[in-house]
Image (cartoon, rainbow, N blue to C red):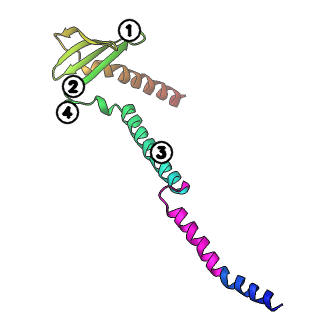
Amino acid sequence: MRRFVTQASMLLLSMPLFAAEQTEKARTLTESPLSAVNLLQTLMGLLLVLACVVLVAWLLKRTNSFHTAANGKLKVIAGIPLGSRERAVLVQIGDEQILLGVTPQQINTLHKLETPLSVASSNGISSDFAGKLRKIMQQRGDK
């Protein structure tokens, strides 16, 4: 019996040492730069940064921020598709307007306009639409 008590007391006295050893092992595993938790956190942070870069690039493309160049002196006035990947684009450079043919391989000058088209004529459609919409709204208000 005395031997059993001695062994039990040795076991009980060694438990804090065993617990401290286990927590030290757990601490070194979580603090290790190659632990699964740290790798997962690093990977998730990287994916978040890449997602932010893609989102900002998409937003800039949607708002046509890339098309504004030379302090507004270079503008795309109009464009029309001619085929699946071909377009005719009217560009204004300063006071001159040039009609360009754009394909995936090259860009060609089709015509240089001697008298530039007024930019208001392209907005005339929207103002005409606004006028018609105003008339319709007034007619519905009168009824």
Quadrant showing the N terminus: bottom right
Q: Residue at image x 19%, y 27%?
A: 73
Pick the front one: 97 or 32: 32
For the residue marked with disc 3, what is the amino acid? Leu
Choose the circle earlier in sequence order: 3 or 4: 3
The location of residue 2, given as percent across then percent down, is: 80, 92
The residue singled out by tag 2 in the image is: 74
Q: Nearer the viewer, mark 3 or mark 4?
A: 3
* Label 3 close to label 1 by CB (< 8 Å): no
The residue singled out by tag 4 in the image is: 71
Task: Classify mark 1: helix, strand or loop.
Answer: loop
Task: Classify mark 3: helix, strand or loop.
Answer: helix
Q: Which mark is residue 12?
A: none
Q: Quote the CA–CA distance across marks 2 and 1.
A: 23 Å
Could you say which quadrant of the image residue 59 lies in?
top left
Query: Please, is residue 41 above or below residue 21 in the view?
Result: above
The residue singled out by tag 1 in the image is: 82
Choose the circle earlier in sequence order: 4 or 1: 4
**Type of secondary structure dominating the magenta stretch:** helix
Q: Which residues are magenta?
A: 16-36
For the residue marked with disc 2, what is the amino acid? Leu
Q: Which mark is residue 47?
A: 3
| Pointer 3 local density, CA inside 10 Å: few below 14, some 14–19, many at least 20 | few
Q: Quote the CA–CA distance across marks 4 and 1.
A: 29 Å
The location of residue 44, given as percent across then percent down, is: 50, 49
For the residue marked with disc 1, what is the amino acid? Leu
For the residue marked with disc 4, what is the amino acid? Asn
Q: Residue furthest bottom?
A: 2
Pick the front one: 105 or 38: 38
Task: Classify mark 2: helix, strand or loop.
Answer: strand
Q: Residue at image x 25%, y 12%?
A: 99
